[in-house]
Amino acid sequence: MLDTLRDPDSAQYRFVGIHPAHCKAGWAKGDNSWSGYAATIEINGKNAMGGYTGYTTYTILFEGGNAWKAIEGSEFGPYGPSKGMLGLGGGAGICRWLDH
């Protein structure tokens, strides 16, 4: 989050949880499947005036023990809506928690 936050040293973090997760590749997206762990965290950072903005949820994707992507929010489907096309479940590029 060093490149994202205005003042990363003063940020406040809350760890919500970490779970195994999987994203299947979408039919039009090539081979973009992913399996690993997704951690949900909340970050309270400072704005330009130096005040805290309130906690924002992020999902951090891990692969091989290394964080490789941070996504704002808890919907971590990088290839489309996490609920699938038209919100019906399934669909191109669906991502899901494996232990829920």
Image (cartoon, rainbow, N blue to C red):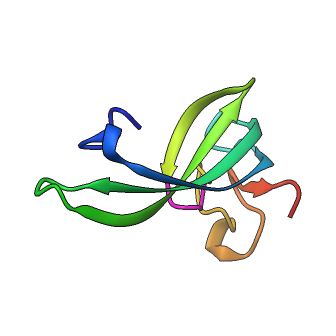
Residue 25 image point, x, y percent: 72, 41
Report the magenta stretch's main SS: loop
Q: Quadrant of the N terminus?
A: top left
Judge from the rendering whether residue 88 lies leftward or rightward of residue 54; answer left or right: right
Work out whether residue 53 or residue 100 is closer to the camera in this orientation and state it: 53
Judge from the rendering whether residue 99 lies leftward or rightward of residue 77; answer left or right: right
**Which residue is found at the position 65% from the left and 62% from the top?**
82
Q: Residue furthest left?
A: 49
Q: Is residue 58 above or below residue 30?
A: below
Q: Would residue 81 be counted in the magenta stretch?
A: no
The magenta segment = 72-76
Q: Residue furthest right?
A: 99
Residue 9 image point, x, y percent: 33, 38
Judge from the rendering whether residue 63 lies leftward or rightward of residue 2; answer left or right: right
**Toward which corner of the image does residue 28 lie, by quadrant?**
top right
Q: Is residue 64 above or below residue 25?
A: above
Residue 93 image point, x, y percent: 68, 50
